[in-house]
Image: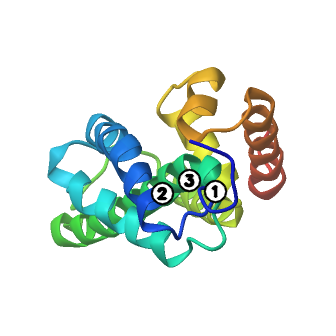
Amino acid sequence: MEKSSSKNNTCKEEVFNELFRNHSEDLYKFLYYKYGADNNPSDLVQEAFIKLWNNCAKVLPEKARAFLFTVANHQMLNELSKKSTALKHATSKPRDFTSEDPEFVLREKEFKKKLEQALSELTESQRIAFMLSKVEGKKHREIAEMLGISQKAVEKRIYGAIALLKEKIDIF
C-alpha cells in the first residue's frame, strides 16, 4: 500500500475493503481456534470491522490489524463472560454436603472475588496480554504478532498486570 495521504486513510472505501480482504480471514481463524465455532467468530469479525469503520478517522491502516484483533478478542471475552455467568446461574444447585473445610471454601470464594475484581481493574491491553500468556499459554512473541505490537510492549503489559494483581490480591 502506498503511503500517500489519499491511500493512507482507513475511511476510504478502497483502503477499508483492502483491510477487510487482508485481515478478515486471519481474524476469523484467530477467534475460531481460540474460542471455537460455537461462539460465532464470523459475527464478531463483522462487529470488529463495523467498529473499525465507525472509528476509521482515528485508526491508521497500519494499526488496523492490531485494532481489529484487540476489539474482536475483547468482544469475545465479554460474550464468554456473559455466557459463563448465565450458565453458572442456570446450573448452580445448592450443595447438600461438602467434604471441604468450610473455612477453605470461604477463603476460596474470597480469593475468586478478589481475583475477578483485580482482573476487571486491569487495562484492556493488560488483561488481553495477561490472559493470552497465563491462561492460553501463548509465548510473548506469539502475543506480539497477534496484537501487532512489540514483544517488549507485551512484556510490559503482562508485568504491569502481574504487579497490579499482586497488589490487589495481596497474597503473593
Q: Does dot 3 land on a helix, a strand or a loop?
A: helix
Question: Vertically, is 141 above or below 152?
Answer: above
Numbered mark located on residue 64 in the image: 3
Number of numbered discs visible in the structure rendering: 3
The first of marks 2 and 3 along the sequence is 2
Please report contact status of discs 1 and 3: CB closer than 8 Å, yes or no: no
Residue 36 placement, left or right of 105: left
Question: Vertically, is 85 above or below 34?
Answer: below
Question: Vertically, is 1 above or below 82?
Answer: above
Residue type for callout 2 = Val
The residue nearer to you, when weighing 81 against 150, is 150
Q: Mark 2 or mark 3: which is in front? A: 2
Q: Does dot 2 land on a helix, a strand or a loop?
A: helix
- Residue in the picture at 71% in, 61% down: 123
Measuring from the top left, give residue 113's x and y in whole percent. 57, 63
| Residue pointed to by mark 2 | 15
| Residue pointed to by mark 1 | 8
- The C terminus: image quadrant: top right
Please report contact status of discs 2 and 1: CB closer than 8 Å, yes or no: yes
Residue type for callout 3 = Ala
Q: Which quadrant would residue 151 be assigned to in this image? A: top right
The first of marks 2 and 1 along the sequence is 1
- Residue in the picture at 17% in, 65% down: 91
Q: Which quadrant would residue 25 be assigned to in this image? A: top left
Residue 59 placement, left or right of 159: left
Between the residue at mark 2 and the residue at mark 3, the CA separation in whole angstroms equals 11 Å
Label 3: few (<14), some (14–19) or many (≥20) C-alpha neighbours in 10 Å: many
Residue type for callout 1 = Asn
Q: Does dot 1 land on a helix, a strand or a loop?
A: loop
